Image (spheres, rainbow, N blue to C red):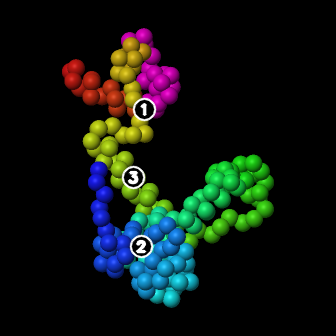
Amino acid sequence: MGTVAVGTGTREGRDRDPRAAIREREILCLVCGRALRQLTNTHLRGHGLTADGYRQRFGYNRGTALMAQELRALYRERAVRVGLARQIRENPLRRDPSLAARGPRRPIQLEEQLNRSEAARRAAALREARFRETGSHPRTKSLDLAVVSALRKEGLSLRQIARRLGVSPATISARLRPTLTRLI
């Protein structure tokens, strides 16, 4: 796969490919042109921007670090050395459940409530779409009609069959109904 040549030293080169502004020892601010080790919130605030706003304005991905490659490597090495990933994975509440009782839970802000309810609505819509496609509700257990018929021939009632299979009698009845109408 070939590489794309970009004039990294020119303003138009950075405009075509903002990745050219992130260099080994510096990052160029695409607003003022200053070379810095990292674009801090303080520097960006001077331009009336946040880090997310800067990324969006110049086409960076959300996860792109706004710092020189050398500095990012230094931070990465330090994180490995102190075991940061292990510390993040470790949940103190699992280790000591009494910690939860010590302090209040954080208040859930309106934005988070809206995000949660929106995610729940999307999940419900996906479940409903799958239900329409497959014709069976995701919560219902699959029943082997041959097993149900065999139990029925043994003389068990619908209630006994339902108890044995771990479903409600209404489920058994509903599943048998289409086959009964086909047989008649």
C-alpha span from label 1 to label 2 = 56 Å
Could you say where residue 26 lies in the image, as x and y percent from the top left? 50, 73
In the image, what residue occupies the spot 59% across and 58% down? 76
Mark 1 or mark 2: whose residue is earlier in sequence: 2
Mark 2 or mark 3: whose residue is earlier in sequence: 2
Q: Which residues are magenta?
A: 152-170
Tell us which disc is closer to us: 1 or 3. 3
Tell us which disc is closer to us: 1 or 2. 2
Determine whether, in the image, residue 87 is placed left or right of residue 183.
Answer: right
The dominant secondary structure in magenta is helix
Q: Nearer the viewer, residue 38 or 101?
A: 38
In the picture of the structure, the residue carrying the numbered disc 3 is 124
In the image, what residue occupies the spot 38% across and 56% down? 122
Is residue 121 among the parts visible in the rendering? yes
Pointer 1 with pointer 2, Cβ within 8 A: no
Q: Nearer the viewer, residue 18 or 111?
A: 18
Residue 170: quarter of image: top left
Determine whether, in the image, residue 110 is placed left or right of residue 75.
Answer: left
In the picture of the structure, the residue carrying the numbered disc 2 is 21
C-alpha span from label 2 to label 3 = 44 Å
C-alpha span from label 1 to label 3 = 18 Å
In the image, what residue occupies the spot 39% across and 70% down? 20
